[in-house]
Image: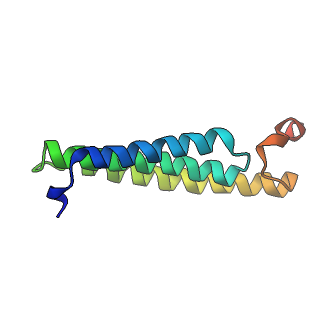
Amino acid sequence: MIENIPLQYFLIVGTLMFFIGVFGFLTRRNLITILMSVELILNSVNINFVAVNRYLYPNNLHGHFFTIFIIAIAASEAAVAIAIIINIYRKFSSINVENVSSMKN
């Protein structure tokens, strides 16, 4: 079934996801939405790794190994980031990035 879908379609979806993630990272003020944008960027890279691996080297699993590694790193990054966000919220009662100057002590 995947053999019928051209590689360009996967690359277009990955590119769109990447730029949506970059746009969300640069324009949002809430730390949770910034974290979600970073995860979207990482998932777009995963799509590109798997798609390119599938079409260029169908018998090798190098792209899949990179993807599993990126998923593990993203999970640990999300856990640490959420812990930091919770501590920021407990201290300042806000997670908006706009108030960074008032967060300095």
Give how far across and how far down residue 50 sits, in percent.
27, 50
- Quarter holding the N terminus is bottom left
Give how far across and how far down residue 59 sits, in percent.
9, 50
Give how far across and how far down residue 78 sits, in percent.
56, 54
Direction from residue 62 to residue 96 in the image, left or right: right
Write the residue at 49% across / 56% down.
Answer: 75
Which of the two residues, 3 or 35, is positioned nearer the viewer here? Answer: 3
Query: Is the residue 20 above or below the residue 4 in the image?
Result: above
Write the residue at 29% across / 48% down.
Answer: 9
Q: Is residue 62 visible?
A: no
Direction from residue 3 to residue 7 in the image, left or right: right
Residue situated furthest left in the rendering: 59
Write the residue at 86% across / 35% down.
Answer: 101
Which of the two residues, 105 or 52, is positioned nearer the viewer here? Answer: 52
Give how far across and how far down residue 23 sits, in percent.
59, 41
Q: Is residue 40 visible?
A: yes
Query: Is the residue 102 above or below the residue 76 in the image?
Result: above
Can you tell which quarter of the image residue 24 is in? top right
Can you tell which quarter of the image residue 89 is in? bottom right
Query: Is the residue 56 above or below the residue 40 in the image?
Result: above
Which of the two residues, 68 or 16, is positioned nearer the viewer here? Answer: 16
Direction from residue 69 to residue 25 in the image, left or right: right
Write the residue at 64% across / 38% down.
Answer: 26
